[in-house]
Amino acid sequence: MAGPERKVWSENYSEWFHKVISETPIYDTRYPVKGTGIWTPFGFRLRSSVLNIIREELERTGHDEVLFPQLIPDYLLSRESEHIRNFEDEVYWVTHGGKTPLDVKLALRPTSETAMYPIFKLWINAYSDLPLKIFQVVSVFRYETKATRPMIRVREVSTFKEAHTAHATREEAEEQVRTGVEVYSRIFGELKIPFLRSVRPDWDKFPGAERSVAFDTIMPDGKVLQIGTVHFLGQNFSKAFDIKYMTKEGGYEHVWQTCYGISERAIAALISVHGDDRGLVLPSNIAPVQVVVIPIVYKGREEEVLKACVGARDALQSAGIRAALDNRRDLTPGNKYYSWEMKGVPVRVEIGPRDLDAGTAVIVRRDSLKKVQVQIGSLAEAVKEAFREIDLELGRRSRDWMETKVRKASSIDEAKEELDRRGGVVEMFWCGRASCGQELEKAIDARILGTPYEDEIAVGQDAKCILCGEVALKKIRAARSY
Ligand code: A5A
Ligand code: ZN
């Protein structure tokens, strides 16, 4: 597709990202606490669009929204040993109320398992209390030691959607993991963010989980970003927090649990995978402003043109489209184009004196910058048709791009060279032993993402582990990651 350039986008992605989020503006990074940021009015609307999609999917699949407290007493946070061992170094502590030292130190939640599960114990007694499926959207705090990055690695994760479920049997909880993966697949599908789903290796599971399935996408610089995770918790937490239900036979059994989370990283991915050198490009369902109408006025018929533009905006709004009119008099059309292109508005409508006579308008697609002339009477229909095409194109373009970044490698040298040269993800065969996996991480200076979620079972008969050469049971993915 001969569209707008994506040169700066791919060659200097980090700078591109900072420019887009601060010039649009979406997110202000000037707050004087490291790892925090401010959602601007436009950014907040973008965030709300994404959250609407997430909420809709979760509610449709039987999850109820709740809100738990932010503070977790130290004795609860440390109740599950694996969990605390991994989060220990990332926790912010509240130790004083005014000048008075607190008897019990309180953690700012790094995630809410240990806040919710003591209450699950109170809520769950009988078989009929299950399954329990809840979620909340909150801020969590993690004292990240790796370099912080706006939205991508923050210390106050301000858009943390976490879902937590409890079930009577292992099978039901495992089924819920599959459902969670499907729910997330649909959410990323709506955002047109391409993804790879990998079962993380044992050494990189969520602290306290038996199994973690992760969604990764590839950013314009070739580095991988984890944009969501679905965890099977087994009975680890239910045993630690003594969450039991009475079985039909009258005995007690600990519940089986899952949890899954998405954060503003998903919004960073949305911005990054679709953008181009002119700024943001957004799918129509996400765009806070879907259409901007711009009057093309020279001297003469200004009032008439403006009137036609107001009419066009009103007609679009009546058709349920989020349309705006840009009638600022001190800006040239070119300057207006620039600012709305930066904001990723999917469609621009231009109306000038010549359109008045012909009864037409020009519509311009943000993704391709292609222009077409349409009858003013069928503007709303034409715009909706453009939305359909744009959304399809964004899905296709981002998926095609990602696919070019996923390569197979059959030797260590080849894998390393691939990652050095092009980034992205390499897929290899693996015997399944942790020792080979971890050695591989060192040998190619990359992170093991895990095995493909889709084909966890057997590979080919003659496949050999890339490291030890023994029979390979699995495919393994590796990448340089955020
Ligand atoms: N309780 C479970 C759901 C949990 O906390 N899982 S998690 O640790 O994997 O976090 C869920 C998602 O939040 C991650 O997949 C990642 O996309 C995002 N996330 C984690 N730490 C983050 C950070 N410091 N900044 C932004 N996003 C983060
Ligand atoms: Zn091996």
Image (cartoon, rainbow, N blue to C red):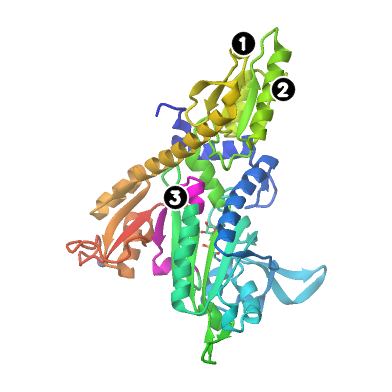
Q: Earlier in the sequence, mark 3 or mark 1?
A: 3
* Residue nearest the observer in this picture, 317 or 19: 317
* CB of mark 3 near ligand 1 (< 8 Å): no
In the image, residue 428 lies at what x, y percent?
Answer: 28, 57
The answer to whether residue 28 is visible is: no
In the image, residue 184 lies at what x, y percent?
Answer: 49, 57
SS for callout 1: helix
The answer for how far apart the CA atoms under marks 3 and 1 are is 49 Å
Q: Which residue is mark 2?
A: 328
**Which kind of residue does numbered mark 2 sit on?**
Arg
In the image, residue 110 lies at what x, y percent?
Answer: 61, 65
Identify the residue at horizontal 60%, vertical 58% (top origin): 160
* Quadrant in the rendering for residue 70: bottom right
Q: Which residue is mark 1?
A: 357
Q: Which class describes the residues within 10 Å of circle 3: few (<14), some (14-19), or many (20+)? A: many
Asked if the residue under mark 1 is in contact with the one under mark 3, i.e. CB atoms within 8 Å, the reply is no
| Residue 350 falls inside the magenta stretch | no
Q: Mark 3 or mark 1, which is nearer to you?
A: 1
**Which kind of residue does numbered mark 1 sit on?**
Asp
Asked if the residue under mark 3 is in contact with the one under mark 2, i.e. CB atoms within 8 Å, the reply is no
Identify the residue at horizontal 62%, vertical 53% (top origin): 35
Hey, which residue is sitting farthest bottom in the picture? 250
SS for callout 3: strand
Hey, which residue is sitting farthest top in the picture? 300
* Residue nearest the observer in this picture, 247 or 319: 319
Q: In screen coordinates, is 318 left or right of 284?
A: right
Report the span colored magenta: 187-206
Q: In screen coordinates, is 229 left or right of 473?
A: right
Vertical comparison of 297 with 403: above or below:
above
